[in-house]
Image (cartoon, rainbow, N blue to C red):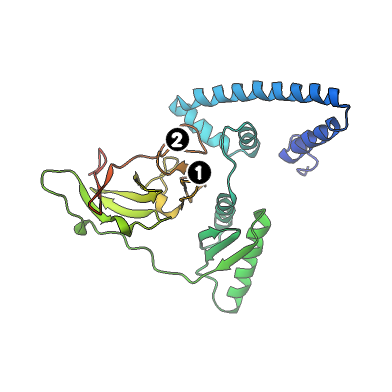
């Protein structure tokens, strides 16, 4: 049975709601008011119940695991989004998720960034004549999978950003603060990777504020420095599965209760200083 034939598929469920709302819009005005009030009352009942379920699940470690798994189910994610309990993924996040699927199917490459409605990729295997076909094929597949994506550009591989060596960091006698990069060296939109006391952090500037987080997504531990910092929205998007976090509070905007691990950070006369988090070697 295809999704279009399955009455429990997301497509069919959404179409049923659309059809009913269209029919309501053709009813006499007083009847419309009653019908919409009934819908709003049911929506609110569901929203309050769902919020309670989420609150109770995230209060228990096993419940949080279950919640993570559930938000991967399209029907559940749609329900949470409809009730304003999680944010709808933006174009960049949807592009990353679609690109991850291509990688899972065997593609070797990297989604460098999404600018406006254009994605920029690196495809190390796309060389020579067949390389042009490969670039074309990947671009088409991505635009087909992501509504709103209008162009895909493939750029040449560049060297990995340099990890700041431990030896270049200095622990000041009598303090636990460790010198990091110059404040002006943390560029807008950059998740700057820094070694601090045996662990790795990402440092960022959002607005005029400085923040630092352990370089591991709390969902599955993937590094955050491969993700995206949106300084306008003040969000970090993990590249692995697209979860969004508030760049300054660390709170997840995708999964309630999930929080980044903070690394104490300060601007000391133009030098970023970090304090190794508890438990760091
Ligand atoms: S590790 Fe999956 S979203 Fe971060």
Which quadrant of the view contains residue 117? Answer: bottom right
Q: Which residue is mark 1?
A: 243
Question: Which of 46 and 270 lies nearest the eye of the viewer?
Answer: 270
Q: Image quadrant of residue 70? A: top right
Residue at 64%, 58% in the rendered image: 149
Count of labels in the image: 2
Q: Position of residue 209 (x, y in %)?
A: 36, 46
**Farthest residue in the bottom direction?**
129
Q: Is residue 88 visible?
A: yes
Instruction: Give the numbered dot on residue 178.
Output: none
Question: Quadrant where the N terminus lies?
Answer: top right
Label 1: few (<14), some or many (≥20) within 10 Å? many
The x and y percentages for residue 97 are 57, 51
Pinpoint residue 124: horizontal percent, then vertical percent.
50, 69
150 sits to left or right of 20: left
| In front of the other: 53 or 270 | 270
* Residue 185 place in picture, x, y as percent: 32, 59
In the image, is residue 81 above or below residue 46? Answer: below
Q: Earlier in the sequence, mark 2 or mark 1?
A: 1
Instruction: Say left or right for 261 vs 156.
Output: left
The residue pinned by badge 2 equals 258
Query: In what element is the residue under mark 1?
Result: loop
Q: Quadrant of the C terminus?
A: top left
Which residue is the extreme one toward the left? 173
Label 2 environment density (alpha carbons within 10 Å; few <14, some 14–19, many ≥20): some
Label 2, label 1: how far apart the Cα atoms are: 10 Å
Label 2: which secondary element: loop
Decide if ligand 1 comes within 8 Å of the CB at mark 1. yes
Marks 2 and 1 in Cβ contact (< 8 Å): yes
Q: In this orientation, does residue 7 appear?
A: no
Up the image or down, 243 lies above or below 53; here it is below
Residue for point 24% across, 54% down: 271
């Amino acid at each position: 049975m295809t999704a279009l034939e399955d009455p429990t598929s997301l497509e069919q469920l959404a179409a049923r709601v659309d059809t009913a709302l269209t029919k309501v819009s053709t009813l006499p005005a007083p009847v419309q008011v009653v019908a919409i009030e009934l819908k709003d009352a049911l929506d609110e009942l569901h929203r309050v119940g769902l919020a309670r379920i989420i609150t109770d699940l995230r209060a228990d470690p096993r419940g949080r695991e279950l919640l993570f798994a559930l938000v991967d189910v399209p029907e559940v994610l749609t329900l949470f989004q409809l009730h304003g309990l999680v944010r709808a993924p933006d174009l960049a996040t949807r592009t990353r998720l679609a690109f991850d699927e291509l990688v899972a199917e065997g593609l070797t490459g990297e989604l460098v960034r999404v600018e406006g409605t254009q994605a920029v990729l690196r495809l190390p295997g796309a060389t020579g004549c067949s390389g042009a076909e490969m670039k074309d094929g990947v671009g088409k597949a991505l635009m087909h999978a992501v509504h709103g994506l209008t162009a895909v550009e493939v750029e040449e591989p560049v060297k990995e950003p340099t990890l700041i060596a431990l030896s270049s960091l200095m622990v000041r006698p009598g303090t636990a603060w460790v010198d990091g990069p110059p404040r002006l060296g943390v560029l807008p939109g950059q998740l700057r990777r820094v070694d601090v006391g045996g662990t790795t952090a990402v440092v960022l500037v959002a607005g005029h504020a400085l923040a630092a987080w352990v370089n591991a997504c709390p969902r599955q531990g993937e590094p955050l420095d491969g993700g995206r910092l949106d300084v306008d929205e003040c969000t970090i998007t993990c590249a692995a599965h697209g979860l969004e976090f508030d760049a300054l509070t660390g709170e997840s905007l995708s999964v309630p209760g999930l929080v980044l691990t903070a690394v104490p950070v300060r601007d000391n006369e133009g030098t970023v200083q970090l304090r190794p988090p508890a438990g760091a070697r």
